[in-house]
Amino acid sequence: MKITAEEVDRIAVLARLRLTAEEKSHLVRQLDNILEYMDKLNQLDTAQIEAFSHRVDTMPALRDDVVTNQPDPEALLANAPDRDGTFFKVPKIIE
Amino acid sequence: MNLAALTLHAAGEKLRAGEITSVELTEAVLQRITASDEQIHAYLTLDREGALDQARRADARLRAKDGDSPLLGIPMALKDNFLTQGLRTTAASKVLGDFIPTFDATTVQRIRAAGAVIVGKTNLDEFAMGSSVENSAFFATRNPWNLERIPGGSSGGSAAAVAADQAIAALGTDTGGSIRQPAACCGIVGLKPTYGRVSRYGIIAFASSMDQVGPVAKDVRDAALVLETIAGHDPADSTSVKRSVPPYSAELLGGVKGLRVGIPNEYFASRMQADVEQAVRRAIRELENSGALIEEISLPHTDYAVAVYYIVATAEASSNLARYDGMRYGGRAGARDLTETYRITRDAGFGAEVKRRIMLGTYALSAGYYDAYYLKAQRVRTLIKRDFDEAFKRCAVIVTPTTATTAFKIGEKTQEPLQMYLSDLYTISINLAGLPALSLPCGFDSEGMPIGMQVIGQHWDEATILRVGHHYEQATEWHKKKAPAIGN
C-alpha cells in the first residue's frame, strides 16, 4: 500500500476537507492506484537533472504598483456569504 | 441560408459588406441554442438580452465604419472559467455559488473591445479538471455528433456549442489538452498557444505553470483571427510575455513544401483506435504529397508524461484552490470553529474529482513526500521538455493524433480516475513543455465520430502550425462536415 487511511485523514486536514467515511474509503483505493502508477518515475535517474522552470528572460520587468481599477465595494460585497456594512463578516478566530 | 452555420471569417465579410446585421446573426445563433441546447446542454448561463444589446451596438459601429476587427458583430461563447463583469461565473463548481465577477478577464476585454457579442458561458469540468465535462457540478454536456457520447473536456461546452452552431467561435482554456481534446471529439479546430502568449488575468486558475487561453473555432482561419485579437502582453499578468504578435491570419498561405514534419515513434507505438491511426497516417501522407518532408523522431520520455502531469497539476491546483474558503464569496457552512467551517464549506462545495486532485496535490507537496513526488516530477518534466528541444533540431512541426480514441460514451470512464487520466496522453506533454499546438479534424471513425490530428510547434511559432493546418484544410474537406442539426 502506498497510502493508508490514517494518511488520508492527515492530508484531509491539511487540505481543509472533511470527507465522509465512504469518500475516504474510495480515496484510499484510488490514490493508492494513482500513486502506484506514479512510481514509474523512479525508473529514471534524475540526480543530475534540474527541476523544470519556465524561461524568465522573456518575462517582463517589474512594473510600478499603481492602482488602475476603481473598486466597487457594493459589487464585491454582493457576493459575500455574510457582511456587516462595508465589511466581510467572518467567524471568530480566537475565543 | 442558416447564418449560424457560417464561419467567423465568412460572417465577418458579410457583416462588413452590409449583407447581414449582427442582430440577425445573433438571433440565428440564439435560435440554434433554443432548438438544440435542451439536448446538448452546452451552456451554463445564457445572456440573450445582453447579446442582442451588444449586437445592436456592433451594428451601429459597422454602419459608422468604426472598427475593422474581424470579430466585430460576431456571437461568441466563453468557457465559464473566464470572469465576466456582471455575468454569473461558476467554473462549474458549487463552491462559487452564484458568483458575479466585478471585472472582465483581459481576453474578455479584448474581444469586447473588438466588438464581439458574448452570448453566454459554457459548461466545463469543475475548475477545468477533466476530459469529458462529466465533472461539471451542474450537468453533463453531450456531443452534437452523438448525444450518447462525451464532447471531450474540459472546454467541452465551448466545443459542443461551436460544433452545433450555437456560437460562431468560442474561447477555452487548456491545461493538459482541454481545448484540443474536445475540439477533436467535436470535429472542430482548437488551438493552445505558447505558454505566455495570451494573458490569463481573470481566468479561474487551475495549474498556473500550464494554464493557457485559446480559440475554439470552425476552421483554422477563424482560430488565427481569434488568436491575433487575444494575444499579447498584459501588464496584469506577469507571465504574459512582451513579444510582438504576428498577423496570423495574413500568414496562413505558403503551403508546406520543404517543411520538416516530425512523427514521434512513441505516439504511434502506444495503443490507439485503428481508424484514428489510419486517419492520422493518411493526413501525414497528404502533407507529404504537398511537399512536406516527413521525419521519424523520438520523444523518449513520453511514457512518463501522465505521471508528471498529474503530480504537477494537482500540486498547483491544491494551492490555487485554497482560496475557496467561504469567506468572501460562495456558500459558508456554520460550524463550531474556523477550521471546521472551512472543512465543511469546502467539502460541500467541491465535487469528487476536485477533492481527489486537491488530496493528491496536497499529498505530493506535504512534508516527507515533496522530494519523492513534486521535485521528482519537475525533474522529469525537464527531460520531457528536452525531448522536444532535441526533436525541433530536426523538424519544424510535429504531427500526432490529438486523442487515442474518438469520443467515448458518457459514463464509460467515470469509475476509474486513472483510466480517464491516461486518455490525455497525447496532449499533456505539450503543456508540460509550454509549447503551442493545434487540433484539427482529419476524418471519422467507423461510427461516424470525428478524429483530430495535432500539430505541435516550437515556442512562439503558432504561425507555422496554423499554416500547416490551413494548408491541410485547403487540401481536404473534413472541416466542412457538420454535426447533424439537432432540434430542427
Image: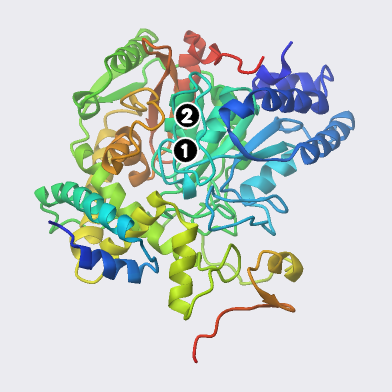
Relative height, residue B120 to residue B309 (above, below) = above
The residue wearing badge 2 is B151
Q: Which mark is residue B133?
A: 1
Relative height, residue B131 to residue B403 (above, below) = below
Q: Give the x, y percent position of residue A74.
A: 76, 68
Q: Earlier in the sequence, mark 2 or mark 1?
A: 1
Q: Kindly indicate whether the residue at mark 1 contacts the one at mark 2 (C-beta within 8 angstroms).
A: yes
Name the residue rendered at 67%, 45% in the picture: B110
Type of amino acid under label 2: Pro
Q: Give the x, y percent position of residue A8.
A: 26, 64
Give the structural element (helix, strand or loop) at label 1: loop
Instruction: Answer with left or right where residue B458 lies relative to residue B10.
Output: left
Q: Residues within 10 Å of mark 2 (few under 14, many from 20)?
A: many
* Snapshot quadrant of residue A81: bottom right
Asked whether residue B337 is in view, the answer is yes
Same chain, labels 2 and 1 = yes
